[in-house]
Image: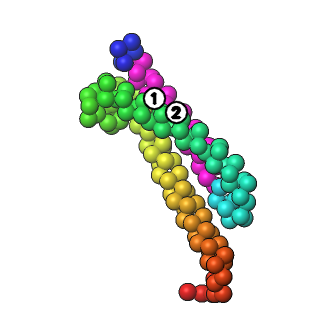
Amino acid sequence: MSRMTRDQAVARLLDGVQADLTACGTIRDLLERQFQAAMRHRGTELTLLAEALTPELDAMEQRRQQRVQLVRALLGPQATMDDLFGSLPAPQRTCGQADWEQLETLVRDCKQATTRNGNLMAEQFTIMQRLLHGEDDTYAPR
């Protein structure tokens, strides 16, 4: 941060939030496609989607780490995004907080979709294991 001014650091933080908003939309779409592929047992498509998700998630994590470092460099070791927004002038604070809230909502949606997808694939795996081991009542009600 020594070469970067405070205004440049804040601009980078807010740009990172904007990039994450775009990335989260992409990730959410990929997760929906992953769910549909899992429902239809499309293994090749699942592999391709995993390959598409990985760099998106890696880039988002890198921006998150950079965000944490910049906020702490600006405001101290325990600083949060709320602290940052509290230090900004009104127009920048209002816009930044709105984007941040939207991002948090999208991240929660993506986490829920990831859990849903993981549960579906785990259940499918369990059923396949039961079939492979010769259970006769695999599809019988429990």
Q: For residue 16: magenta?
A: yes
> Is residue 69 in sight in this rendering?
yes
Decide: marks 1, 2 in contact (CB < 8 A)?
yes
Residue at x 35%, y 25% (from the top left corner): 89
Residue beneath the point at 26% across and 28% down? 76
Instruction: Please provide percent x and percent y for residue 75.
Output: 28, 27
The residue where tag 2 is placed is: 18
Q: Nearer the viewer, residue 85 or 139?
A: 139
Residue 99's place in the image compared with 108, above or below, is above
User: What residue is shown with label 1?
Assistant: 14
The magenta region covers 7-33
Asked which secondary structure carries label 2, the reply is helix
The amino acid pointed to by label 2 is Gln
Give x and y (percent) for residue 22: 58, 38
Residue 94 in view, yes or no: no
Q: Is residue 110 left or right of residue 86?
A: right
**Lateral position of residue 100 relative to residue 18, left or right:** left
Q: Quadrant of residue 2?
A: top left
